[in-house]
Image (cartoon, rainbow, N blue to C red):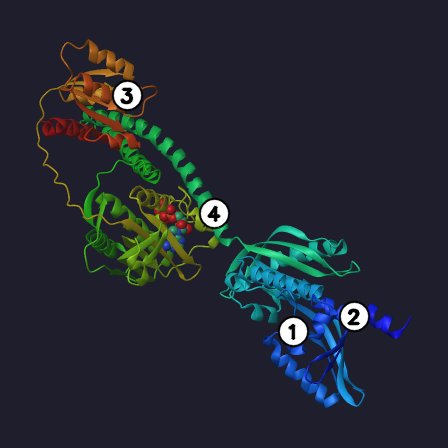
Amino acid sequence: MSARRLYEDCPVGLALCRMDGRFIDVNPAFAAILGRTVEDTLALTYWDITPPTYDADEAQQLDLLERTGRYGPYTKHYFHRDGHIVAVRLSGRVVEHDGQRLIWSSAEDITDQARAADALRESEQRYRSVVETTGEWIWELNLALKHTFSNRAVERILGYTAEQFLALDTLTLMHPEDAEEVGNKLPALMANKQGWRGWLVRWRHKDGRYRYVESSAEAILDPSGELRGYRGVDRDITHRLELEEQLRHAQKMDAVGKLAGGIAHDFNNLLVAILGHADLLAESVKHDPTAYEDVEGIRHAGQWAASLTQKLLAFSRRQMTSPVRMDLNDATRDCAALLGRVLDDNIELRTELHPESLGVFADPGEIEQVVINLVTNASDAVGSRGTITVRTATVETVEAGEAGEAGETGEAGDTEADERALLEVTDDGSGIPPELLDRVYEPFFTTKAAGAGTGLGLSTVYGIVKQLGGTIDIDSELGRGTRVRVVLPLHEAPAPVAPAPTEVGPTKRILVVDDEMSVAVIVTRVLEAAGHVVEGALSAAEALAALEAAEQPFDLLLSDIVMPETSGVELARRCRERWPSTQILLMSGYAPNQALEMAPTEVIEKPFSPDELLRRVRDVFELSP
Ligand SMILES: Nc1ncnc2c1ncn2[C@@H]1O[C@H](COP(=O)(O)OP(=O)(O)OP(=O)(O)O)[C@@H](O)[C@H]1O
Ligand SMILES: [Mg+2]
């Protein structure tokens, strides 16, 4: 084969050109790179086919050529005939030909390679940006269990930048218990070159608190299949776990509340009967001192039981209350003044009240109960010496349950932040162990000696606060103290005016309805003793029959609210429709929402004393038109 043939058939582009760039000869492979024929190409110069953007590269290669007589190999770009740019691997050297210095070059088309390299770079960039922008924590671990890579997410989760994190002895940041478990499981996984899914691991944040992450990883194998390390994705689920915990706690409190409310309701009925009979009995034995004393004993115990029942009802948010607009500051001041006198001399009770009045819509008795319970707990916690601070302020809640101090959260001002009243009791006492913190609201949960505490204080407070549409939050550190924050809605409406009660009441015809026989009996006896004409019914159906049968409408329907089949509320509605002149008073151990909604029906709260019952009955007629 002749040298010329070799030249013509060579798959690599070959070109001979003068120092000024004019082509003297090119082989077909070279022309093909440019999409041209050989003749076509020979009409051009090197500069015609070189895009100007690469001038700097060219100058550098020319310089090399000048100095060494050789250039390349380097990546050179040409204009293809149809306008796109092709990449070649170019190299060459100076040759002497007939006394002339010429450049002899070889060019290999690497457009496909260059394209592949670009695509690779692009895909790498894409993955890098995904890895760096994702909220998931992505990392790599070598066989010595040292982190060798971490994306930026680690900073959000653990507070260290990726660089700082990699410089640490990272496994010491893992919770010791989790580190032990991982240490136990990992050898078997490594032996099988297996990864893991959904491990729950605690990592210590820079601030010292643990974050929960859900970790998944896969083994990194080298081309020969040997394990090189692990690559994983961890997700911070701390917030989710906190929400789940809150939900679980709320559900538990709800269930306990229902149970307590149910028990309290039944007890209330019994107590109405016990206290009512005791009152009647006291009346009939008042000339026999021994018997009278015994009855007093029954009344005392009954009242104590009634007060426990009240607390349970408060906890289960079924307490009947008479809310009014009141100033939280006034109530707190009065209550603190009272408590200050009874507290140990070595306990300092400070009050820091908001300079302006804080209107809340509550029963004054409820606010009093809240303050007394919180301060009593604080005083028990500080023992014989310490400081208790009762503070009121306003707070802005941006989201439910997330209260920030007004003024401290400056930026919250322009959003739909809702201003609320804060009542805070802080002590420097014993504190509450973290593991007990979510049990303290449970009724009957107490750490105090038998007889020293019933465990109903915080349950009562919890129920009252929830009923008032507020939130309660306890922050405590063992050995340092406790801070209880109660946040209540502010209420700016004017207070309703309560009419003054009067003394005497005329005889009325009353229909008493209660499915609890003992209650019906005692109520009837009390009313009859006061001169009223009473008929009794044990169900709504019986009551409706009695209403129907009466020649003249009754003056008053006095009915229990909670009864099987038809409730007192429904009975009241029908009665009001058919017999509008009949007044209605409902009796309840607790307040289902419907009872509250059907104002202006009067409701009397069980247990009640005979006096209280008579007064309420009288009031119904006094207040009606
Ligand atoms: N300020 C506080 N400091 C430390 N522990 C507290 C504080 N407040 C409440 N606790 C803990 O919570 C438990 C429950 O409190 P709660 O007020 O419900 O019941 P109690 O004080 O034990 O009894 P009661 O209030 O019915 O007399 C207490 O026994 C105590 O262990
Ligand atoms: Mg208490």
Does label 4 or label 2 sit earlier along the sequence? Answer: 2
How far is mark 3 from mark 1, CA to CA? 106 Å
The quarter of the displayed image where residue 111 is located: bottom right
Q: Which mark is residue 514?
A: 3
Check the picture and name the quadrant holding the C terminus: top left
Query: What element does badge 4 sit on?
Result: helix
How far is mark 2 from mark 3, CA to CA? 108 Å
Question: Mark 2 or mark 3: which is in front?
Answer: 2
How far is mark 3 from mark 4, CA to CA? 41 Å
How far is mark 2 from mark 1, CA to CA? 18 Å
Compared across the picture, whether 44 is left or right of 543 comes to right
Query: What element does badge 1 sit on?
Result: helix
Question: Mark 4 or mark 2: which is in front?
Answer: 2
- State yes or no: discs 4 and 2 in contact (Cβ < 8 Å): no
Q: Work out whether residue 23 or residue 39 is closer to the camera in this orientation and state it.
A: 39
Compared across the picture, whether 228 is left or right of 399 comes to right
Q: Is residue 510 above or below residue 299?
A: above
**Where is residue 196 drawn, in percent x and y?**
67, 52
**Where is residue 288 drawn, in percent x and y?**
20, 27
Identify the amino acid type marked 4.
Glu
Identify the amino acid type marked 3.
Asp
- State yes or no: discs 3 and 1 in contact (Cβ < 8 Å): no
How far is mark 1 from mark 4, CA to CA? 71 Å
Compared across the picture, whether 121 is left or right of 553 comes to right
